[in-house]
């Protein structure tokens, strides 16, 4: 039975988690990319659009669409790179910091909902085991989905 296969269980759980993230973020008018981009800008500071795409592993067309949405909402600022005016430097704004805090609260709600049947020790163990698998396959050339 495929329900006994760890790969099947991981795939099904990942799909469910992805739906949860999408639904929760839609409730506050956001997408998962928004959280990833704001988190990257807070973590690493202003950077070129290309570097932001590399650090978050977001495809260029998705990156541009998300940045356009976020700029329109006032969460990020694009400025020409003084060294190369063909390129943009992306930075987070004060409203972007507030938005990140709001989305972080949503992420915590999602984690609680997803991991509800597990106690804290089981949650820590699951996270450790998933990290071990991820790091192993990343070391084998498995491309990361996000370097956050």
Image: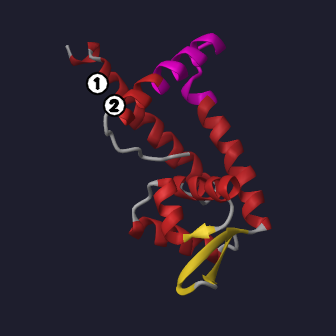
Residue reaching furthest to the left: 1
Q: Name the disc covering residue 8, or none.
A: 1
Task: Provide the major secondary structure of the magenta segment.
Answer: helix
Tell me which colouring the rendered structure shows.
secondary structure
Q: Is residue 61 magenta?
A: no
Residue 115 coordinates in the image, percent (x, y) = 57, 23
Residue at left 53%, top 71%? 49
In the displayed structure, would residue 133 be above or below residue 104?
A: above
Q: Name the disc covering residue 75, or none.
A: none
Q: Residues within 10 Å of mark 2 (few under 14, many from 20)?
A: few
Residue assigned mark 2: 11
Q: Which residues are magenta?
A: 112-131
Q: Is residue 116 left or right of residue 135?
A: right
Residue 11 coordinates in the image, percent (x, y) = 33, 31
The reply to whether callout 2 and callout 1 are in contact (CB within 8 Å) is yes
Q: Is residue 44 left or right of residue 36?
A: right
Residue 23 coordinates in the image, percent (x, y) = 52, 47
Residue at left 56%, top 45%? 148
Residue at left 48%, top 69%? 50
In the displayed structure, would residue 37 be above or below residue 109?
A: below
Residue reaching furthest to the bottom: 85
Q: Is residue 20 left or right of residue 103?
A: left
State the image quarter where residue 72 is shown: bottom right
Q: Is residue 117 magenta?
A: yes
Query: What is the CA distance from the residue labelled 2 to the residue labelled 1?
Result: 5 Å
Residue at left 37%, top 33%? 139
Considering the numbered disc 2 on the image, is that residue within a helix, a strand or a loop?
helix
- Specify the quadrant that holds the N terminus: top left
Q: Residues within 10 Å of mark 1 (few under 14, many from 20)?
A: few
Residue 38 coordinates in the image, percent (x, y) = 64, 58
Residue reaching furthest to the front: 83
């Amino acid at each position: 039975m495929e329900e006994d296969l760890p790969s099947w269980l991981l795939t099904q759980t990942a799909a469910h988690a992805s739906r949860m993230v999408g639904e929760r973020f839609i409730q506050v008018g956001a997408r998962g990319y928004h959280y990833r981009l704001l988190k990257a800008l807070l973590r690493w500071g202003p950077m070129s659009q290309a570097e932001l795409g590399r650090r978050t592993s977001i495809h260029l067309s998705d990156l541009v669409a998300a940045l356009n949405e976020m700029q329109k909402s006032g969460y990020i600022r694009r400025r020409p790179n003084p060294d190369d005016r063909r390129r943009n430097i992306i930075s987070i704004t004060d409203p972007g910091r507030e938005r990140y805090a709001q989305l972080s609260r949503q992420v915590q709600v999602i984690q609680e909902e997803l991991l509800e049947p597990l106690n804290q020790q089981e949650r820590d163990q699951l996270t450790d085991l998933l990290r071990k698998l991820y790091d192993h396959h990343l070391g084998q050339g498995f491309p990361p989905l996000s370097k956050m």
